[in-house]
């Protein structure tokens, strides 16, 4: 009989005894207790039943000390705070991350690292191993933070790989497919002078959207015209500047695919100032399907990427990485890269 979490001899049940009762290995019991999603429902139920039968109670303090555990995760945004609060992408990502962590004991630390001083401070903080894992959001190709985290052997997941050869686990949406669907929609509406205002081109997702844009045009038999591609930076002001340049270099443009809804809003302002009607003169498509898209005049056609679901998936993957690192020998596997589908939402702007 179990009494207060102790067996007949007055001794607390061990992890090994729980494993034996459940018919699984010690590592599997550890994964269930640590909340890893990499366990089947049947196995999880067997372990939980064994825990209940034996009255096993994890010694949280001892486990934390032995594993150097902090029960904290850092969400690192290597961007200025102004951009974080101006773009819906970040708030949606934070909402998904927070929702997935709600049923765990993990605390979430939001950290900005948009400047050299902030990066140095963050590097010192991470080197002290004050968090169990790191989520990296909006990382540029030349950002040193992912390599720093890898060198410190801190479990980490990145939102969108830095390249096709990304070495960290990542979660992204189908940027290539989303861009193709946007351009194919514009082509189906009879548009032929379709411009693209890109995002930061040192962001891999922005590069993939350019690839999707170009491939859709090429397959429609439309020759590439670099005067129709203007670099933006995902901001409203960047959209304004890029749209002004487009109208100067390609005044016959009849459609614009923007790298974000915020960028599309900036482009829309310039089109209105220049007397161009949307969609009669210039059709407009954005990316993210944020609240901005729904409240624009006219409402903006946009590519929806499941940002909250991406945040949830990042947490699931990170908790798996954390649990696996605590097992003997570490994870020892190829990093997992999840790509969630993107969906075109058609509204009056196109």
Image (tube, grey):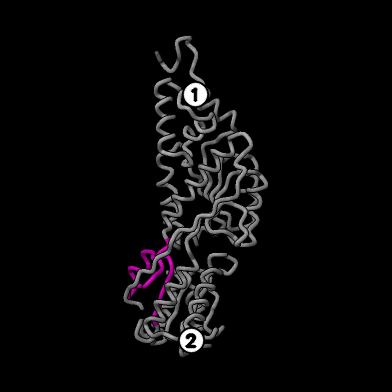
Relative horizontal placement of residue 163, taking residue 183 as reference (left or right): right
Query: Which quarter of the figure has residue 343?
Result: bottom left
- Write down the residue under mark 2: 247
Q: Secondary structure at mark 2?
A: helix
Residue 265 showing in the rendered view: no
Residue 256 position in % (x across, y down): 44, 79
- Marks 2 and 1, how far apart at CA: 72 Å
- Write down the residue under mark 1: 20
Residue 290 position in % (x across, y down): 39, 64
Q: Residue at x 42, y 54 (%)?
A: 309
Q: Which residues are magenta?
A: 283-305
- Where 259 falls versus 118 (above or below)? below
Residue 283 position in % (x across, y down): 39, 81
In terms of sequence position, does the residue under pointer 2 or pointer 1 come before the other?
1
Q: Is residue 302 magenta?
A: yes
Q: Nearer the viewer, residue 133 or 123?
A: 133
* Quarter containing the N terminus: top left
Q: Residue at x 50, y 68 (%)?
A: 176
Relative horizontal placement of residue 28, taking residue 274 as reference (left or right): right
């Amino acid at each position: 009989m179990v009494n207060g979490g102790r067996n007949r001899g007055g001794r607390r049940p061990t992890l090994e005894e729980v494993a034996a009762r459940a018919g699984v290995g010690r590592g599997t019991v550890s994964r269930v207790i640590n909340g890893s999603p990499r366990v089947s429902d049947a196995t999880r139920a067997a372990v939980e039943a064994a825990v209940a039968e034996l009255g096993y109670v994890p010694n949280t303090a001892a486990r934390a000390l032995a594993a150097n555990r902090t029960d904290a995760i850092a969400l690192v945004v290597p961007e200025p705070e102004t951009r974080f609060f101006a773009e819906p992408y970040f708030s949606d990502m934070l909402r998904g991350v927070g929702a997935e962590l709600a049923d765990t004991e993990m605390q979430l630390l939001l950290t900005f690292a948009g400047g050299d001083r902030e990066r140095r401070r963050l590097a010192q903080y991470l080197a002290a191993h004050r968090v169990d894992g790191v989520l990296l959001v909006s990382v540029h190709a030349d950002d040193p933070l992912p390599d720093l985290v890898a060198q410190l052997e801190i479990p980490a997941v990145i939102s969108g790989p830095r390249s096709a050869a990304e070495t960290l686990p990542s979660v992204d949406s189908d940027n290539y497919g989303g861009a193709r669907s946007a351009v194919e929609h514009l082509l189906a509406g009879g548009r032929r002078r379709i411009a693209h205002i890109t995002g930061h081109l040192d962001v891999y997702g922005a590069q993939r959207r350019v690839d999707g844009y170009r491939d859709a045009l090429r397959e429609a038999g439309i020759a590439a015209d670099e005067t129709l591609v203007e670099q933006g930076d995902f901001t409203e002001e960047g959209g304004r500047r890029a749209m002004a340049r487009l109208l100067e270099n390609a005044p016959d443009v009849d459609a614009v695919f923007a790298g974000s809804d915020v960028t599309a809003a900036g482009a829309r302002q310039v089109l209105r100032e220049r007397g161009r009607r949307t969609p009669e003169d210039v059709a407009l498509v954005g990316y993210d399907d944020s609240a901005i898209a729904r409240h624009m005049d006219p409402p903006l056609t946009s590519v929806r990427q499941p940002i909250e679901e991406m945040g949830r998936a990042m947490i699931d993957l990170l908790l798996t990485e954390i649990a696996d690192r605590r097992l003997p020998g570490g994870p020892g596997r190829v990093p997992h890269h999840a790509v969630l589908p993107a969906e075109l939402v058609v509204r009056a702007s196109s």
